[in-house]
Image (spheres, rainbow, N blue to C red):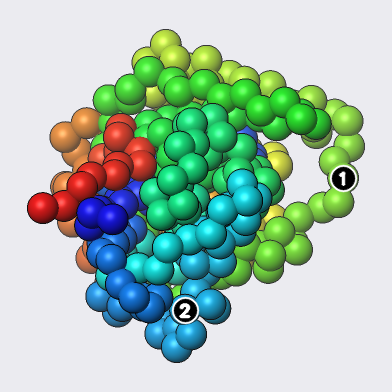
């Protein structure tokens, strides 16, 4: 086995009304450097990652082993250095990036020769829905839907926007964020929420970012319920809009929030918002358009 590297972007899901079906890839990355080894070893190179003393308990190893077993194969042992810029349990797709990394690790170590669609199907079976794993795999701005055994996705035209993420210093587990959502919605609410989501996608495809921004902030599916779990969220939205952002929404299940802004204004908005939120990590980002990257090392 030749040494190789796996690089997977972070992601932000929902984008307001695109609940469980819309996501974007972000220019922050999980990176695995894989070299031959007689025994399994995971070495963490980031303070964002907890120590895992036993490789069999490592999340990425579990994913890789599961995928290899599904194809009747076994993994060859390896020494893996793991680095990440993606904080855990912050709504930036840390689990989705790890799932994609684990699938690709199995693909290489067990010589599975998986297609992109097979990788996506494996990822959705593990994650439960495609909104984070599809952008992590393909990059860009993606809408996807699973209906029974059918899985469809569409990569939208590249967006000319800057992104600003506001990352608080606490975790919010996805299961806790889902617990505050209603079990069902009245038909009138569901109809309006669906229309808002459709209008948002149409506006993005036409490049009407002002209209898309208005739709992003009118979500009825989840933001109303989750906003109370995020301190100062009601302050971030109007302040970012005052500084020129099109809209601000919860990133995934939170607690990170994310603003969409005109191209070239991200750094300025991030800098000015940092003075308002000194206890947050605030960063201007772009949308990753590459998705999963795998490269051989010399």
Q: Categorize mark 2 by other alpha carbons within 10 Å: few (<14), some (14-19), many (20+).
A: some
Q: Nearer the viewer, residue 7 or 250?
A: 7
Q: Nearer the viewer, residue 128 or 5?
A: 5
Identify the image quadrant of the N terminus: bottom left
Can you name the residue that lies furthest to the top here?
206
- N-terminal-most mark, 2 or 1: 2
Q: Residue 28's spot in the image, x, y percent? A: 29, 53
Q: Secondary structure at mark 1?
A: loop
At a point 79% along the width and 25% down the height, the residue shown is 191
Q: Nearer the viewer, residue 81 or 73?
A: 73
Question: Please, is residue 289 above or below residue 226 in the view?
Answer: above
Name the residue that disc number 2 marks. Answer: 55
Q: Residue 112's spot in the image, x, y percent? A: 49, 42
Q: Secondary structure at mark 2?
A: helix
Can you name the residue that lies furthest to the left here?
298
CA–CA distance in space, label 2 to label 1: 40 Å
The answer to whether residue 166 is visible is yes
Name the residue that disc number 1 marks. Answer: 184
Q: Is residue 129 left or right of residue 212?
A: right
Question: Please, is residue 115 above or below residue 167 in the view?
Answer: above
On residue 51, the disc is none
Q: Residue 86's spot in the image, x, y percent? A: 36, 62
Q: Residue 143's spot in the image, x, y percent? A: 55, 28
């Amino acid at each position: 086995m030749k040494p190789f590297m796996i690089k997977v972007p972070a992601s932000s899901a929902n984008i307001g009304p695109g609940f469980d079906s819309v996501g974007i890839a972000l220019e922050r990355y999980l990176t695995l450097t894989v070299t031959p080894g007689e025994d399994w070893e995971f070495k963490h190179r980031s303070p964002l990652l907890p120590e895992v003393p036993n490789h069999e308990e490592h999340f990425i190893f579990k994913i890789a082993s599961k995928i290899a077993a599904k194809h009747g194969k076994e993994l060859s042992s390896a020494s893996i250095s793991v680095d990440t810029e993606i904080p855990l349990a912050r709504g930036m797709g840390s689990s989705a990036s790890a799932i994609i990394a684990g699938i690709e690790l199995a693909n290489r170590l067990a010589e599975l020769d998986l297609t992109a669609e097979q990788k996506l199907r494996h990822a959705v079976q593990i994650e439960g829905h495609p909104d984070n794993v599809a952008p992590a795999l393909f990059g860009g701005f993606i809408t996807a839907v699973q209906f029974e055994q059918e899985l469809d996705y569409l990569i939208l035209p590249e967006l000319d926007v800057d992104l600003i993420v506001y990352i608080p210093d606490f975790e919010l587990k996805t299961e806790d964020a889902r617990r505050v959502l209603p079990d069902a919605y009245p038909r009138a609410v569901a109809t309006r929420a669906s229309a808002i989501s459709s209008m948002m996608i149409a506006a993005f495809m036409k490049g009407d970012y002002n209209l898309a921004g208005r739709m992003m902030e009118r979500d009825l599916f989840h933001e109303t319920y989750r906003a109370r779990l995020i301190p100062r969220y009601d302050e971030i939205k109007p302040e970012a809009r005052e500084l020129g952002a099109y809209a601000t929404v919860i990133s995934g299940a939170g607690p990170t929030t994310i603003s969409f802004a005109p191209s070239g204004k991200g750094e300025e908005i991030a800098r000015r918002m940092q003075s308002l939120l000194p206890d947050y990590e605030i960063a201007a980002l772009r949308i990753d358009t590459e998705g999963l990257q795998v490269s051989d090392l010399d």
